[in-house]
Image (cartoon, rainbow, N blue to C red):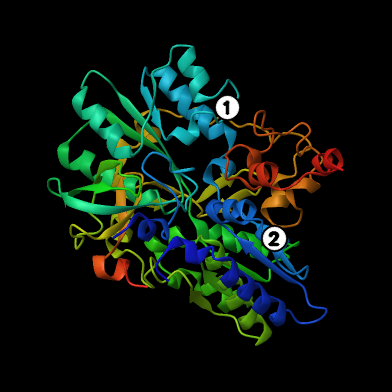
Amino acid sequence: MKYVDEFRDGDLIQKALAEIERLCEPGRAYRLMEVCGGHTHAIYRYGLQDLLPDAITLLHGPGCPVCILPMGRLDDGLELAQRHDLTFTAFGDMMRVPGVNGSPLEHQARGLDVRMVYSPLDALKLAREHPDLDVLFFAIGFETTSPSTALTLMQAKAEGIDNFSVMSNHVVLFPALRALLDGPDCRIDGFIGPGHVSTVVGCAPYAFIPEDYGRPVVVSGFEPLDLLQSITMLLRQMNAGEARVENQYTRAVLWEGNLAAQRAMAETFVLRPHFEWRGMGSIPGSAHGIAPAYAAWDAEVKYEAPAVEVAEPCGACCGQVLTGTLQPDECGLFSVECTPERPVGALMVSSEGACAAHYNYAPRIADLEILA
Amino acid sequence: MTAADLARLGACTLDDESCSVCGDNTVPVRALAEAGPGQMTVEDRLGARATVATAFTPDARPGDVLLVAAGVALTHIPAPEAATP
């Protein structure tokens, strides 16, 4: 298939849906979880859940690192910047995320030097070109963004740039998947694996899911037909009583991933013993701290982090939505007290959080009543 | 290599990454030219250009498609393969 239109071609979509319908065994339910904000977004944007047979339920797992970041971490970063007169840099997506005392943008309005960067390399460039500034990069993301931070740390060390540091909030996907599968309310029958994380880590690390838990995994692309093909592949495995890792997104993902990026991450990061995930609690080994060899660029070593702890908002059901126990609109706060404009729960914070995607794309009963 | 070839690898562009930290968004771009050690000038499907790091894709050549996250190319697809149905 050459063109994007072919991944959205109506006839091909209908054929894929007919095949999925044919594969659904009578009386059997198929609960499939995607763990990628991009997939969640695509599923809602193209209304895929509504196209699928009732037997198939798509669950929206923890695919958005902005959503799962505890509020206290952002407050720590902003507090560090204030205390030590640092220039706070972060991706644009972090700028509106609320902390206890406001978002980075609100801190900027109050006088803190806050700058949006496209890449940690841009934050390093700022430090290189402005020796008078002390630049902090607030790093966040799964394995797709970790390599850029790793490369930045290696460059900072190679050039001896000492007015630059990183506060790492990089999270690791696989311990979170294990935590989901170990959960007492686990309702997941199979996983739609994240495409671009897999360009870095490859497909092999998913092997524990079929081996230890008997669930299949299909690494998937992001077009509607990619997702439908991945669902077809999952159904075929499940109907045959099989569980293995397959790669649907072969046009971008190598089985072994990107070995150079993996080596850079291994050099610059160490696994934290524990890391707190909003809505899921503390998960062992689920985040990257900075390796001792790079301690001079580790903001949490260079400066003393205040370790702010913030309680989860009362009434929000983020944990149940993240683990697939509830759908977004089954939370009592959804669309009433918790909206993208005034997010209460973690999953409403980023546009690709499950609740924000549901809010933006799924028809709401109130809307339907108005239309009626 | 057409804009559609890039789009089939993702809808994001250099100016609109959707959410760059969602962990799964990369920007598909076409490599134009070397721009110094470990760097290449690239162009997205809308014609916007940027310089990205290619330390992790050392075999990338002008004409290849790169998938870029946070200013760093994570994978490269050789030009003929990228345009092959």
Q: Quadrant of the C terminus of chain A?
A: top right
Mark 2 falls on what kind of element? helix
Distance of mark 2 from mark 1, alpha carbons?
33 Å
Near-viewer residue (A128 or B67): B67
Q: Quadrant of residue B62?
A: bottom left
The residue that appears at 78% across and 67% down in the rendered structure is A54
For mark 2, does the 10 Å Cα neighbourhood hold few (<14), some (14 to 19), or many (20 or more) residues?
some
Mark 1 falls on what kind of element? loop
Chain of residue at mark 2: A
Q: Which mark is residue A99?
A: 1
Q: Position of residue A265 (x, y in %)?
A: 33, 54
Which residue is disc 2 drawn over? A49
Near-viewer residue (A304 or A103): A103
The residue that appears at 22% across and 38% down in the rendered structure is A156
Q: Position of residue A266 (x, y in %)?
A: 33, 57
User: Which amino acid type is marked by label 1?
Assistant: Gly
Q: In the figure, A190 relative to B76: above or below?
A: below
Query: Does the rendering let one see residue B78?
Result: no
